[in-house]
Image (tube, grey):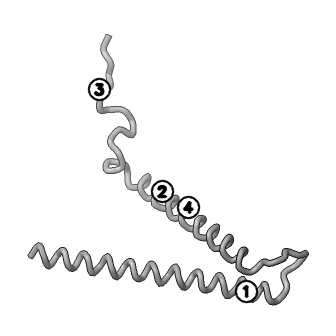
Amino acid sequence: FTSSSGPGSAPGGGGLGGADPQLQRFIEVETQKQRFQQLVHQMTELCWEKCMDKPGPKLDSRAETCFVNCVERFIDTSQFILNRLEQTQKSKSAFSESLSD
C-alpha cells in the first residue's frame, strides 16, 4: 500500500508563509474588521456607562451631547495612541538601523 501524498503535503501544512496572496489579504481584511468591531464594542460600553444614567424611551439632549463628546474623545484618544505607537516603532527601527551600520 503506497500513499501518493508524503508527510509534508497535507493542505495548509506550510503555514501562512506559503499561502496565496488572496488568502493573506482576506485574513488581513477579516482581522481589521474584527479589530474595528472590538473598538465599536468598547466605545459603546464605555460611553453607555458614562452617559446613560437612567434609560428612557428616547435620548434627551444632555445624553445625546454626552454620547457625541464621548465618541469623539474615544476616537481622538485611539488616534493619538496609534500615532504615538507608530512614532515609537519608527524611532526603534531607526535606532536599530543606526546600530547595524
Q: For the point 80% across and 89% down, which residue is it? A: 62
For mark 3, what is the residue? 6
What kind of element bears circle 3?
loop
Marker disc for residue 26: 2
Circles 1 and 4, Cβ within 8 Å, touching? The answer is no
Tell me the CA gap for discs 3 and 1.
Answer: 62 Å
Q: For the point 37% across and 78% down, which residue is it? A: 86
| Residue type, mark 4 in image | Gln
Q: Nearer the viewer, residue 17 or 34?
A: 34
Crowding at dot 1, Cα within 10 Å, few <14 / some 14-19 / many 20+, comes out as some
Q: For the point 55% across and 85% down, which residue is it? A: 76
* Residue most extreme to the left: 101
| Residue type, mark 2 in image | Phe
N-terminal of the two: label 2 or label 1?
Answer: 2
Looking at the picture, does residue 9 appear above or below residue 17? above
Which is closer to the viewer, label 4 or label 2?
4
Which is closer to the viewer, label 3 or label 1?
1
For mark 4, what is the residue? 34
